Amino acid sequence: MTGSRVVALGHYQPAKVLTNEDLAAMVDTNDEWIRSRVGIKTRHIAGPEEPVDELAFQAAGKALANAGLSPDDIDLVLVATSTAIDRSPNMAARVAAKLGMGSAPALMDINVVCSGFTHALATADHAIRSGSATRALVIGSDKMTEITDWTDRTTCVLTGDGAGAAVVEASEEPGIGPVLWGSVPEMGHVVRIEGTPPVFAQEGQSVYRWTTSQLPALARKACEKAGITPEELAGVVLHQANLRIIEPLASKIGAVNAVVARDVVDSGNTSAGSIPMALSKLVERGEIPSGAPVLLFGFGGNLSYAGQVIRCP
């Protein structure tokens, strides 16, 4: 095999929905203020019985079902998350146990915050290309509301909980393009999850300026590495951080014929869960045809970024 491809997707969100009106009863904000600044209407909130690994497990089960596979068909599990409170067993191990995997899969968590899923997808692709794995389960899962300061109106309006998962397998024809990844270490402080207990904080204007000025060229370079032009893209799925970031970015990339994911409006910022969840929904609704090229691009914490063009399952 000379490459790998995404063969199926799945996603999961908690049932509880928090509206802008609900938030207005908690902090000094209102629906118009939130929509005008971040474009979010609602977000889903996980309860105490839904930790990060439970969200991941639910999404993973749906992806496996959509692929027509059993848990024992998987030999690599990667979970991208930055909100796992416990360090060991890691989230990948807990998901594997919940799924009943008995085939001794390799198990790894990847913490690159909001770009975690695209980093994990590239890692799975590399493992399969090298022959170290044949079929991987790649999951992005975060419970952002557990680390949210509900008295800070600049951040509490953003966060939501959820997970998305992809089944990746070896393929004669590469369906996952070369990754473009990197970071700006000296600006790592602009997005933080620090303290005991950990709390999410960011310098919103710094993030906005960096993403809108620097990311379009990086996204176009990811397309170039895949050998396609932005005009050929059928879909663009950026990290669902803020609608005011997503819409200018999609326009500046030049993907004039692409469906642009705007799941942030209904789901909020779910960090590593945002890209696979948004992509899964687009595929489920039939908005992107099978085999069509889709740009995935994650960015955020550490000012790390990772993007690649994939063929839609």
Image: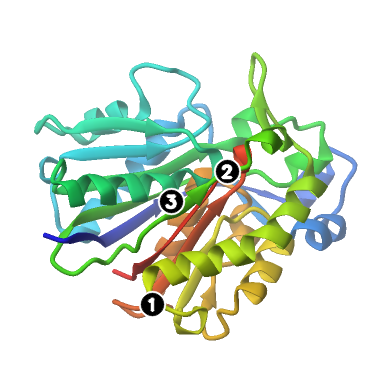
Please indicate, yes or no, whether residue 282 appears anywhere in the rendered image: no
* Residue position for label 3: 118
The disc at residue 183 is 2
Q: Which of marks 1 and 2 is nearer the N terminus?
A: 2
Q: In this view, does 226 lie above or below 308?
A: below
The disc at residue 286 is 1
Q: Is residue 306 above or below residue 246?
A: above
Instruction: Kindly check if marks 3 and 1 are in contact, taking CB atoms under 8 A apart as contact.
Output: no
Badge 2 amino acid: Ser
Residue beneath the point at 61% across and 45% down: 300
Closer to us: mark 3 or mark 2?
Answer: 2
Q: Which of marks 3 and 2 is nearer the N terminus?
A: 3
Q: Is mark 3 on a helix, strand or loop?
A: helix
Front position in the image: 183 or 295: 183
Position in image of residue 265 (x %, y %): 65, 61
Describe residue 104's horizontal placement relative to residue 18 as left or right.
Answer: left
Q: Mark 3 Cα within 10 Å, few/some/many (few <14, many 20+)?
A: many
CA gap, disc 3 and disc 1: 22 Å
Badge 3 amino acid: Thr
- Residue 106, quarter of picture: top left
Front position in the image: 44 or 167: 167
Q: What element carries label 2?
A: loop
Instruction: Kindly check if marks 1 and 2 are in contact, taking CB atoms under 8 A apart as contact.
Output: no
CA gap, disc 1 and disc 2: 34 Å
Closer to us: mark 1 or mark 2?
Answer: 2
Residue beneath the point at 29% across and 77% down: 291
Badge 1 amino acid: Gly
Indicate the quadrant containing the N terminus: top left, top right, bottom left or bottom right: bottom left
